[in-house]
Image (tube, grey):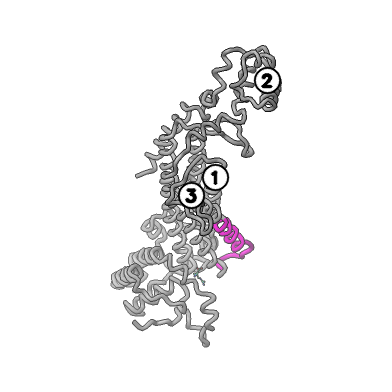
Amino acid sequence: MKKNNQKLWGGRFSAPTDELVEEFTASIKFDRRLYAEDIAGSIAHARMLARQEIIPAADLKPLVDGLEQIREEIVSGTFEFSVALEDIHMNIESRLGEIVGLEIAGRLHTGRSRNDQVALDFRLYIRRQLLAVEGLIVDLIKVLVDKAESNLDVIMPGFTHLQQAQPVLFAHHLLAYVEMFKRDSERLADCRKRLSLSPLGSGALAGSSFSLDRESVAAELGFSGVTANSLDAVSDRDGVAEALFDFSLLMVHLTRFCEELVLWSSVQFNFISLSDSFCTGSSIMPQKKNPDVPELIRGKSGRVVGSLVNILMTLKSLPLAYNKDMQEDKEPFFDALDTVVGSLRIMAPMIAEMRLNDEVMASQAGAGFSTATEIADYLVRKGLPFRLAHEVVGRVVGFCEAEDLLFTDLSMLQWREFSDLFADDLLALLAPLDAVNAKDLYGGTARAQVCVQIALLRKYLGSVLV
Ligand code: ARG
């Protein structure tokens, strides 16, 4: 097939484009990812033009058939992309001319500019991809809820400052991440709402002098309405920036989790074992099993946050309306999207296959005087002001540390040397599991409360999983 690389805007030019310029300004290498949205947008536009009698009714079928043929050519890999044709819009339009003839193909772009065309394509693309990411987040949430539910008896030390603080249920710890991921998914859905107005009909910047039916095109493409200001519509990239922030925060949440997986799988913690199929070895140290996957997710988060900064810097100080700078909006989004999708996809099976060393976790849960707050609360219930109770238990901890003893090693006589409020009912509080189940307030780590949350999350999953 002989390629027609004739510029679609060549009329006023007398010299050919410099090859370096062609290469430098072309976006086809990356914006070809918008082909499906570009074709869907063109078909809807063509139908509307025919309905409004702006183009001859007889032209509609060849236009639609031609565009569908192009879609098939792209899907099957036979479409020949050309850098000289700059971007996905002109590659497709030029090919359409080859298929249906310039007379008919030349009518498609009536009442449209590449500026409202690319704004439309990218909105459609982002909406579709955000929905897919929301689905992947929900898949991960389901794995976490399953893991929490099947390990309801596992207790572990809860940390502040990475120092042992109070014992918690392992399930409670996992569900903390579920809350983050749930918010991440809601944020993406919220972002899609603001991407639900169609910019088509905004033209290059000023609107259109044809009697376009903007609403019907918008409805056909699944939008809920049309944009209100043509200047804004062709230069608004808020959705890209918002989506990249949402991706960034999602990645930050993933890095927090991954950091814990790296720590927990170390010999020093030994809380979990990641499946062999999710780890790699060392080329020199035969004993090594490295948690590469969580490390790499942690590392890749930088690309996503970098993409957010990238789009914000691209948009900063841009005068209205469209500027070529805006072509730089796509690569950061694509790269961030690929990173997020790759990370979520691998995270779910890695968590599903991870094994817990519950005995180590449980023994650590009781170490470090982790029930001290419980004992102070006990004194408070016996009438001592909290600050004084804190002081008393602090002294017990100091004594135990000096004597290398645990709370459970002390006799009642020894306890009573610190306060005569201590009595035999204290003994029911000293085990970590007792401390866990004492936190029986909504949102706390008691088993009953964690079960409440699991039930709520099952309901949530039921409403979002189709
Ligand atoms: N490839 C361009 C982009 O992604 C399409 C819009 C070009 N518009 C223009 N007036 N040059 O931004």
Identify which amino acid the numbered label 3 is placed on: Leu
Badge 1 density bin: few <14, some 14–19, many ≥20, Cα 10 Å: some
Q: Which residue is mark 2?
A: 389
Secondary structure found at label 1: loop
Secondary structure found at label 2: helix
Asked whether the residues under the numbered discs 2 and 1 touch, taking CB atoms below 8 Å apart as contact, a structural biologist would say: no
Asked whether the residues under the numbered discs 2 and 3 touch, taking CB atoms below 8 Å apart as contact, a structural biologist would say: no
Q: Is mark 2 within 8 Å of ligand 1?
A: no
Question: In percent of the image, x 34 and y 79: which residue is there?
Answer: 98
Distance in Å between CA atoms under marks 2 and 3 = 47 Å
- Where's the N terminus, which quadrant? bottom left
Identify which amino acid the numbered label 1 is placed on: Ser
Left or right of 232: which side holds 214?
Answer: left
Badge 3 density bin: few <14, some 14–19, many ≥20, Cα 10 Å: many
* Residue 361 in magenta stretch: no
Residue situated in front as seen by the camera: 118 or 249 = 249
Q: Is mark 3 within 8 Å of ligand 1?
A: no
Question: Range of the magenta residues?
Answer: 302-323
| Residue 430 sits above or below residue 15 on the image | above
